[in-house]
Amino acid sequence: MQEKIAKTRTFRKFFEKEQISTATLHDLIDLARLGGSARNGQPWQYMLVNTPELCEKVFPHLGWAGYLSDWKGPEPGERPSAYVLCFLNKKWMKGPETEAQFDLGIATQNLLLGAMELRIGGCRIGAFSPKLADLFQMPDHLQLSLVVALGRPRETVIIEESQDEDDIRYWRDEHGVHHVPKRSLENCMVDLKERKG
């Protein structure tokens, strides 16, 4: 399981021409919907985008890699071949929106783990223009909250242990290899003494 999780990285460059079938995307959404949900509210709905024409319309509205400020996103030929748009159905919410967002983290991790099994990489994108939703006839009860970009990865992503616990910025080397520093297990652990009295 650790190896599968370690391989499921964020990818931002893809083989754009390699399409992902609607059936495969349905299978990935099936994994997403099976995740745990606070109060079993299951407030998420998903829209599949996998035609080149619609992918091209979605792409300009997305923000890519905040730490790589000089990089404006993947070039033509390296862009995602599919997207999953994640909509919060406000009619189905059973509690606060924060609970629904936890559910979305679980759902999209399930989706990305399943995608990696099929050699499909992904990138969760929360930085998108409000104009993205304007591409669609949106009912009032749906709120676009996240975009998952998908495609066969066209880059190498390496996890390495962070040398500075305060510097966790990812970066690319001169060969285009994407490096992702992770805090050590020791740094992630905390041991608090029990309060007396």
Image (cartoon, helix red, strand yellow):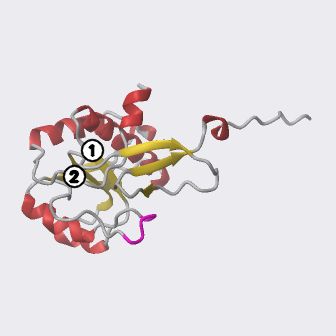
Three-letter code for the amino acid on which mark 2 is drawn: Phe
Residue 50 percent location from the top left of the image? 12, 53
Which residue, as the protein is rendered here, is positioned at the far front? Answer: 174
Which one is nearer the viewer's eye here, 35 or 78?
78
Residue at the spot 29% in from the left edge and 39% down from the top edge: 111
Q: Are marks 2 and 1 in contact (CB under 8 Å)?
A: yes
Which region shows up in magenta?
66-70
Residue at the spot 34% in from the left edge and 54% down from the top edge: 175
Is residue 172 visible in the rendered image? The answer is: yes
CA–CA distance in space, label 2 to label 1: 8 Å
What label does residue 14 carry, if any? 2
In which image quadrant can residue 22 be found? top left
The answer to whether residue 70 is above or below residue 45 is below
Residue at the spot 43% in from the left edge and 65% down from the top edge: 66
Residue 95 percent location from the top left of the image? 46, 49
The answer to whether residue 42 is above or below residue 169 is above
Judged from the image, the secondary structure of the residue bearing numbered disc 2 is loop
The answer to whether residue 49 is above or below residue 66 is above
Q: Which residue is mark 1?
A: 121
Using residue 42 as the reference point, say whether residue 81 is left or right of it: left
Using residue 189 as the reference point, say whether residue 114 is left or right of it: left
State which quarter of the image contains the C terminus: top right
Is residue 91 visible in the rendered image? The answer is: no
Q: Main secondary structure of the magenta part?
A: loop
Total numbered labels: 2
